[in-house]
Each structure stands twice: as structure tokens, then as C-alpha cells.
Amino acid sequence: MQWVSQVTDFLGRILILAGGPVLVAYAAIRVFAKSWLKHELDIRVASFQARQAEQLEAIKSRNAEQLEQARHRLNTLFRQTSKLHEKEFEVLANAWERLNEALGLVSKLVSFFQDSVDLDQMDQTRFEAFVSESHLSDVDKQELLSADNGYRNVYYEERIFWYRLEEARTACRQLHRCVQSNSIFLEPGIRERFREIDNLMWGALSSREVGHKAKYDKPWIDAVRFLEKKITPLKAEIEQSVQTRLGYEVEN
């Protein structure tokens, strides 16, 4: 506004030379001009402040909307992650339970220390009660009851082996299906360990079966070593991995 001041000062000098009435008029004009300029300036400042306030409110609104969207995405992600972890824990607990069941049956079948009972030394009443409560099929029970004394142990041990083998195989199949059908929920390292021990147990069962069929001890010995050197240490690794995944502190 410097130019306005300069113009009014210039006009003022002229008006001083022009006389009193003109000077009074000039003073009035100057007062009016300053008042008008102040009013115009106030209007523009108010307009500017209004626009700034509107822009600020618009920015606040956008920020609030973006914050709400981010909060919604975060909550959705948290719920999804929580559900995935819940499912993972459920799968791990189930797989661990099936592993223990399968490995227990495999170990029992592969072990050199087999459960045995001397049927040839039983009296007829106890013998018949034992056969009745056994896991043999009705056909096998009848054949065992008909077996000559002195041949009972041989028949029973041969037949019960195949029942125990199938029981172990069934448990291994259940473990295999559990891991395969839920593999997407398992951490890759744990998933591979479960698959590895699954394959190892099937290998031990196969060696045990071959040795039994051939009446040859070497495959049976191989199965025992397989169990001691590979399967048992791998189970310990899986246990530690599962506990770590579930959040437990594992002591070395």
C-alpha cells in the first residue's frame, strides 16, 4: 500500500496550496480511503482464513478417513492372523498326538523285546478265555483254538504280527493324512520334519516286514537301528520345533 500513501501525500501537498475547503474535503477522502482499505483488507483476510479453514477441515476429514481405513485393514489382518495361528496350533497338537501314537506302535513292532505269552503252557480254560479276548478275527480265533498244543505259540505269534503291523500302518496313514491335508497351516521347517519322520517310519515298517517274511534278522536289525539313529532324534527335533512355535521356552 506504499503507492497509495505516496499518492495521498502528493495530493495533500497540492490541496494545501488550494485552500481550506479543499483541504477539509481531502481529509475526509483520506479518512474514507483508509477506512475502505481496512475494510477491504479485513474482507480478504477473512476470506483467506475461511478458505484455509475449509482446506484444513478437508485435510482433517481425509486423514480421519484414511486412519479409519487403516484401522479397519489392521483389525481385519489381526483377525485373520489370529485365526491362522489358532488353526496352526490345532493342527500342530493333532499332528503331534498322531505322531506319538504312530511312533509308539512302530517302536513296539520293531523292538527286539516283543510281548509274548506261552499259550502252550495254559490250561484249556485260560487258553480259551485268552483267545476270546484277543484282537484276532473270528476265523483266526477258531483256527487257534483248533491248533494242536505245541503249535499254539507259533500260530498266534505269526498271526498277531500282521495285526500289529496293520495297526501301525493305520496310525502312520492317519499321521500322513493329517500332515498332508493341513500342510498349508504348518511352518515349512516343521512340515518337512513331519514328512521326513513319516517316510522313516514307513521304511522301518517295511524292513520289519521283509525280515519277518524272510525269517531273516538283518532287515529287523536295520529297522531297529533306523529307529534309534534317525527316527528318535528327529522326533526330539520336532518336539522342540513344535514347542518353540507354540511359544514355550525350550531348555537346551
Image (cartoon, rainbow, N blue to C red):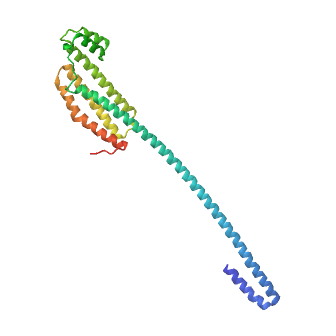
Residue furthest out toward the right: 21
Nearer the observer, 19 or 80: 80
Nearer the observer, 96 or 115: 115
Q: Quadrant of the N terminus?
A: bottom right
Which quarter of the figure has residue 2?
bottom right
Which quarter of the figure has residue 207?
top left
Which quarter of the figure has residue 165?
top left
* Residue 118 against residue 18 in the figure, above or below: above
Total numbered labels: 0
* Residue 198 against residue 120 in the figure, above or below: below
Q: Is residue 102 left or right of residue 36?
A: left
Q: Residue at x 27, y 27 (%)?
A: 106
Residue 6 at what x, y percent from top left? 69, 84
Residue 247 at what x, y percent from top left? 36, 44
Q: Quadrant of the C terminus?
A: top left
Nearer the observer, 137 or 149: 149
* Residue 181 against residue 83 in the figure, above or below: above
Q: Is residue 15 left or right of residue 172?
A: right
Q: Is residue 75 left or right of residue 202?
A: right
Q: Residue at x 79, y 87 (%)?
A: 23
Q: Residue at x 25, y 13 (%)?
A: 126
Residue 209 at what x, y percent from top left? 23, 23
Q: Residue at x 36, y 42 (%)?
A: 245
Residue 220 at what x, y percent from top left? 19, 26
